[in-house]
Amino acid sequence: MNTPFPRRRLAGTALATGAAAILLAGCTAAGPSASEAPAVELPFGPTTPAASGPVDSVTWMLPSEPATFDFDIDSGAAENTVFANVCERLMAVQPDLTTVPHLAESAEWVDDTHVVFTIRDGVTFHDGSPMTAADVLWSMQRHAADGADESDEYANVVSMEQTGEREITVTMAQRDAIFIQAMAGNGGMVLNPRVVEAQGDAFGSPGTPDACTGPYTLGEWKPGSSLTIERAADYWDDSREVLAGEVVFRWADQSAVVNALTAGEADGSYLDSPASAIPLQQVSDVSLAQGPSTNAWVLLATERGPLADERIRQALSLAIDRSGITTAAFGGLAQPWKTPIGQGAWGYETEAFQAAYDELEGAPASPGDADLERAKALVAEAGAPDEPILVASDGGSVRNVVSNALVAAAKQIGLDAEIVTVPSAQYGDFYSDEAVRGQADLFSDEYYISKNDPVGFYKNGASTATVNFVGFSDPDYDALVKEAFAATDDAERAELAIELQRRWVEATPWISIAQSPSTVALRAELTGVPASAAYLYYPWAADLGTTEG
C-alpha cells in the first residue's frame, strides 16, 4: 500500500553496534549526506553478513501484538514483520529495496494500458494445493475491492481477467509506472481462496490457518502472549534454503524490548525507535545494524484552520530545529531531513535525487538568523492566527520532543503554539476521523511507503489525496502526478518526481523532520537478516542463522 495509515507506522528505525562499526555485506546503499551524517558512526547497508549455519528456534520481539492477518482489513509493522515470512506476492522486495518477479515469473507492459503477469508454475499453498492463475485473479480482485486496505494500489485499474492458463491481464485507465512495483507489497499478496472462504469472517484471527505459499506457516497464536511461525514442510521453492526452524514472536513496548535483548531473553528485533539502540550499544552480546528505508518523521497539517495559509506552514518549517530533535529524540541516530520520505525511496536515478535534495531550501537542519528572519516576515505577511496553534502528542518520548520543538519554533517567530495530549489508543485515528483531527492543527508520525519510488509518495499532495488534510490544491501539481505515474522511463519519471518534491517542500503540506533508517538488533551469534526496511515484505527469517556453521 502506498498511503500508510496509522496502523502502518513503521516499527524500525535506528541502530548501532555493540562492537566496533563494521562494514556490512552489500554496503552499497547511499547513506546520509556528509553534512547530515549521524553523530555516531554506525554500520549501514541493506543486509547483515550472511549466516553460516541454521538455527532451530529464535525469539523475536515486536512493538505490538498483531491485530489481524487479513491484510485487506488492516496491516501494520507487527503484522508485516510476521507475515513477510508466511505470505508471498507477485513481485518480491529485495534487501536493497529493489523488486523482482516472484509468484509472477514475469510482468510486462504490452501496450500503454495493458500489463500482463505470467504466473509461475509449480507453486503450492501450505495446504498442498497448486496455485493457479484463477487464485491470483481472485486475490487481486479481493485487494482491489472498495474499502480494502490495498485498494489504492488498484486506483488506475479498469479491469482484470485471466487471459491464459498462467496469464493475468490488467487493463489500466492510463499507464501506471509503479503498479508492477506495487505488486511486491500487500496488494500483490496471493491467497488461497478456498482457505479464506472456509474461514469466513474469522479469517486472519487467532486459531485460523494461513492461506499462503511462503517459506513459513502460521503456528500457534496465543492472544496476549506469543505467536509462532514454523518452517514450511514442503515449501515449493527448492532453490531457497530456509535457515531458522521456527520464530516465536513476543511483543512489548520498546523499554521492555531493550530489557529482553539485554537480558538474553530475546534473540532479535527490528527496533521501534533509534533511541532504543543507545543502551544496546553497551551490551556485548547484542549486535546492531542499520539500513535504508523510506521512513521519515513528519508533522502532518490538518484541516482545522490556522495552517491553511502555506506561509504559516513555511515559517514553522524554517524555524524548527531538526538537528535538536534528532539529538534529543533519537540520540543522533536519525538525520535531519528536508522531505517526507527517506533515501530508501530513491530506487533509481539516485544521483539526480541526491543533487535535487541538496538544493532544496525551506527545511534547514538548524535554523540560522536568516531563516528565522524569513520566517518572521512570512508570519507578518500572513498575519498570526487568532488562536494558538495546537500540536498533538500521545505522551511518547519522540512525539513529546517533536511537539516541544514546534512550540519553541513558533515562539521564536511570533506565533503561539500549545501541545494537546491525545491518548495513544486514539492517536491513530487522526488519519481516519475528522473529529479527532479537529483537536489539533498538527500531529506527528513516522511515515513510509512500500515502494522505492518517490512518485509513490508525492501522489499524497494531489488535491484528491485522502491524507491531504490541509487542502493543498494546485492543478499543475495534480497534472504532474498523473504525468509521473505514466512515465515508465526512469530518467523522465525522476525529473517529474523531483519537480513534485520541489513543489511539495515549497508548499509544505506537511513539515518534514527526520529520516529514520531501519534498525535491527540481534544476539551476537546470529546474522543474515536484512538491515533495511525490506523486512516488512521480505522473508527475513529464512536468512536468519548462526555466525558460525
Image (cartoon, rainbow, N blue to C red):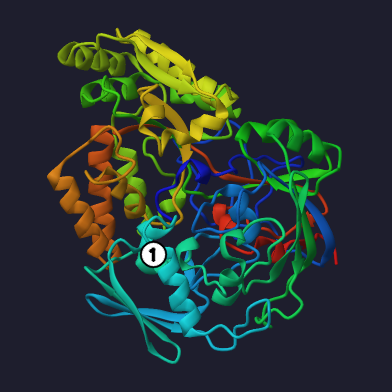
Quadrant where the C terminus is found in the figure: bottom right
Tell me which residue sits at (77%, 77%) in the image. Answer: 233
Tell me which residue sits at (55%, 34%) in the image. Answer: 38
Quadrant where the N terminus is found in the figure: bottom left
251, above or below 545, in the image: above
Name which quarter of the figure residue 543 lies in: bottom right
Identify the residue at the far left of this view: 475
Tell me which residue sits at (41%, 20%) in the image. Answer: 391
Q: Nearer the viewer, residue 344 or 468?
A: 468
Using residue 276 as the reference point, say whether residue 484 is left or right of it.
Answer: left
Q: Secondary structure at mark 1?
A: helix
166, above or below 335, in the image: below
Using residue 238 as the reference point, say whether residue 518 is left or right of it.
Answer: left
Name which quarter of the figure residue 256 lies in: top right
Using residue 219 as the reference point, say whether residue 28 is left or right of it.
Answer: left
- Give residue 385's position: percent from left, percent from top: 25, 12
8, above or below 103, in the image: above
Q: Nearer the viewer, residue 26 or 512?
A: 512
Identify the residue at the far bottom of this view: 165
Q: Nearer the viewer, residue 11 or 282?
A: 11
- Amino acid type, label 1: Ala
Q: Residues within 10 Å of mark 1 (few under 14, many from 20)?
A: many
Say whether residue 316 is visible. yes
- Give residue 111's position: percent from left, percent from top: 23, 80
Tell me which residue sits at (23%, 64%) in the image. Answer: 486
Say whether residue 46 is visible. no
Across the whole image, how many numbered discs are drawn on residues?
1
Query: Would you name the residue on which mark 1 appears?
Result: 144
- Give residue 330's position: percent from left, percent from top: 58, 29
